Amino acid sequence: MKTNIKLIVAAISLCFSGTAVAQQFSSSYFMEGSLYRHELNPAFIGTQNYFAMPFLGNLHLGVNGNLGVGDILFNKDGKTVTLLHPDVSLDEAMKNLNENNKFIENFSLPVISVGFKAFGGFNTIGLNVREFSGFHFGDDIFELLKELKNDKSYNIGQIGVQAQAFVELAFGHSRNLKEVDENLNVGAKVKLLFGAARMNAELDDLTLNMGKDKWTATAHARGEINVTGVEITKKYEKYNDDARNTQTDPKTGEKYGYETIDEFKMNNAGLGGFGLAFDLGAEYDFKDLVPGLKASMALIDLGFISWNESHVVENNGTPFVFDGFKNIQIKDGSGTPMSDQTDKVKDDLMNLYRLENKGNEGSSTHGIGATMNIGAEYTLPYYKPVRFGFLSTTRFQGDYTWNEERLSVNYAPCNWFEMNINGALGTFGPSFGWMLNLHPVGFNFFIGMDHLKTRVSKDFIPLNSNSDITMGISFPLNSAPKKTYN
């Protein structure tokens, strides 16, 4: 099974073998004792001055996807096999696959985080390392690898991969706008962005004609790498038919058929780019109309990074003869080791796009993706330690756009203890989350998950692709206001 999973991974990693701004920790949105709610809505006014432990103040790591291992594993005669196994029919293999599969990986590492009351409101300063990577593809690639029939044409839809990493220095301020309405809180953040690297590849409209005598392919693809100091080297590839190897390698004098991308080398790495972003938010207490009801809205990461260099590789759609997918075995056996077979499939998939280096095209500007949060919470009138919350989140990021609707039950029986459980539905399917927040005097610790792993195989392999964990340690400099439930 291990080797079959490797083959699946190879089949979906044709886009540079690359990795896709950190997803928020939604479970904390309605937790009043959470010191980092301002990252979901800058209008949430903090009640405690604090400083966070470096690198552990608000650490987040998560992966989301709408195609899980459980969708590509099957039980045949008591054995767990992948959809590429010969005993799995094409219809059976394709039934669990989505027309548009996407995976998103998120990472956020806090370096400095402080909050303090001043200037008529609450202020925050944060220095964070942020990374995002995403991958999307259709189900056509699996049909191609499953069948590989001659005298048939395959059209593989859009495939894309995106990644970016940057450092964020954020300054936030929130306050009660009593001059307008004492029930209205507003907030904003200004973020200075220091780009490390970005990559985006879109592979469109690949057509592969599997003739008896030869296979021909047509592809449109473009990749952009935004990083300072990168060098893209090329290599010379040979056709299986030596008669078509008519060009000469200037260094070795050997004959070859075509040029393609070899590797990316870093020479003098530096700051990749600089940008600016804003967070805007508002919260309103409807206590004069409906006691216990609050509503809030925020727009996060409204901004861009201007990158210094744009290294472009592309294929303009010129038809060519494809010599790959020869003698590929799908299961272990004598002869070529499975790891070598996996590498060959991966190389063949890469060669389908014949990417050529177009050089550095200068600076370019790209958005970092924006998030909209809309929330409503209600405190029970006869038992105020319990509050219910509804949060709608939409991330706007092109092909990696996603949304979810989350319901939560929050329980705060005393001044230093909070917890919640929540459930969500959205782009990545159903999920279950939780959060525990302990904040006695001088110490604040929280831990939680928006996506709890609930499905595993008999071999304890997770069957879905949604998982995350968030935790943090901070040190409040004053006591939290005592809760009153009168």
Image (cartoon, rainbow, N blue to C red):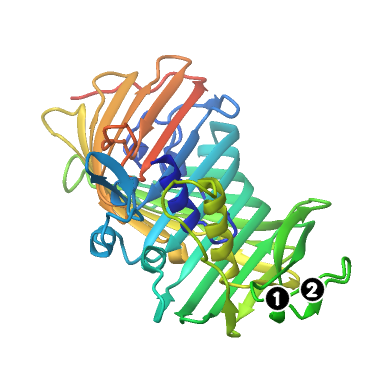
Quarter occupied by the C terminus: top left
Q: Earlier in the sequence, mark 2 or mark 1?
A: 1
Extreme residue in the front direction: 334
- State whether residue 165 is above or below residue 89: above
Q: Residue at x 60, y 65 (%)?
A: 366
Rendered location of residue 336, percent (x, y): 54, 50
Q: What residue type is labelled 2?
A: Lys
Rendered location of residue 261, percent (x, y): 70, 65
Circle 2 or circle 1, nearest the eye: 1
Quarter occupied by the N terminus: top left
Q: What residue type is labelled 1?
A: Asp
Task: Find the distance from the CA under tag 2 to the CA under tag 1.
Answer: 9 Å
Task: Name the residue tied to disc 2.
Answer: 255
Taking the image as shown, residue 264 lies to the left or right of residue 448, namely right
Extreme residue in the top direction: 441
Rendered location of residue 69, percent (x, y): 34, 46
Q: In which quarter of the image is residue 318?
A: bottom right
Q: Residue at x 48, y 27 (%)?
A: 472
Mark 2 vs 1: CB contact within 8 A: yes
Task: Name the residue tied to disc 1.
Answer: 242
